[in-house]
């Protein structure tokens, strides 16, 4: 496994209320697009899309911090808090949109790859850190 999946592999079933923050969220994603025709056609809400984007950002930072990348030292430690944020957000998305772990992992992988190849991490992290703080983690 690579990227966020390797870092956030131990998923626990937990639910939390996610505060919507969609200023930088990607285009709407339908559950059916991620999981195939057998999945529910419930579109992901803006807050859910944002939670996936932030989870990917946290994974990218955590991976960089684990590798000792100096640029990632500017952010607070992300391994534990970022993983818990993802677990709670993923559980909420799975419950509401009817997605399974594989579908959520696929969506997360897409967000991670988008952030990793682009130059958007520095723009995404400030609102994501606010969302993380607001989550109480």
Image: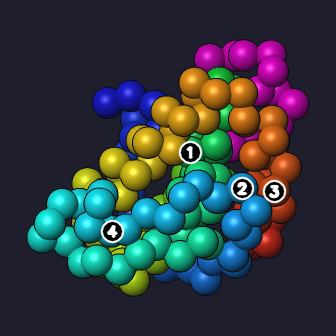
Sequence-first tag of 2 and 3: 2
Left or right side of 27 for 62:
right
Left or right side of 67 for 87:
left
Sequence-first tag of 2 and 1: 2
Q: Are marks 4 and 2 in contact (CB under 8 Å)?
A: no
Mark 2 → mark 3, Cα distance in angstroms = 9 Å
Mark 2 → mark 1, Cα distance in angstroms = 13 Å
Left or right side of 54 for 124:
right
Mark 1 → mark 3, Cα distance in angstroms = 13 Å
Question: In the rendered image, is residue 57 in sight?
Answer: yes
Query: Is 19 in front, or is 132?
Result: 19
Q: Quadrant of residue 130?
A: bottom right
Sequence-first tag of 4 and 2: 2
Where in the figure is residue 100, as x and y percent of width and height?
26, 66
Sequence-first tag of 1 and 3: 1
User: To which residue does mark 1 refer?
Assistant: 56
Q: Are marks 2 and 3 in contact (CB under 8 Å)?
A: yes
User: To which residue does mark 3 refer?
Assistant: 127
Secondary element at image label 4: helix
User: To which residue does mark 2 refer?
Assistant: 24
Where in the figure is residue 106, as x and y percent of width and height?
34, 48
Query: Is 108 in front, or is 120?
Result: 120
Secondary element at image label 2: loop
Where in the figure is residue 118, as x and y percent of width and height?
64, 28
User: To which residue does mark 4 refer?
Assistant: 31
């Amino acid at each position: 496994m690579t990227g966020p999946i390797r870092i956030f592999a131990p998923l626990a079933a937990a639910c939390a209320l996610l505060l919507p923050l969609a200023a930088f969220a990607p285009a709407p994603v339908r559950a059916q697009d991620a999981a195939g025709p057998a999945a529910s056609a419930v579109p992901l809400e803006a807050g859910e899309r944002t939670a996936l984007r932030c989870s990917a950002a946290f994974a990218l930072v955590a991976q960089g911090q684990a590798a000792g990348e100096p640029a990632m030292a500017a952010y607070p430690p992300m391994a534990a808090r970022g993983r818990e944020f993802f677990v709670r957000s993923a559980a909420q998305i799975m419950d509401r949109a009817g997605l399974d772990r594989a579908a959520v992992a696929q969506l997360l992988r897409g967000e991670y790859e988008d952030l990793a190849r682009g130059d958007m991490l520095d723009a995404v992290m400030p609102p994501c850190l606010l969302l993380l703080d607001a989550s109480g983690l």
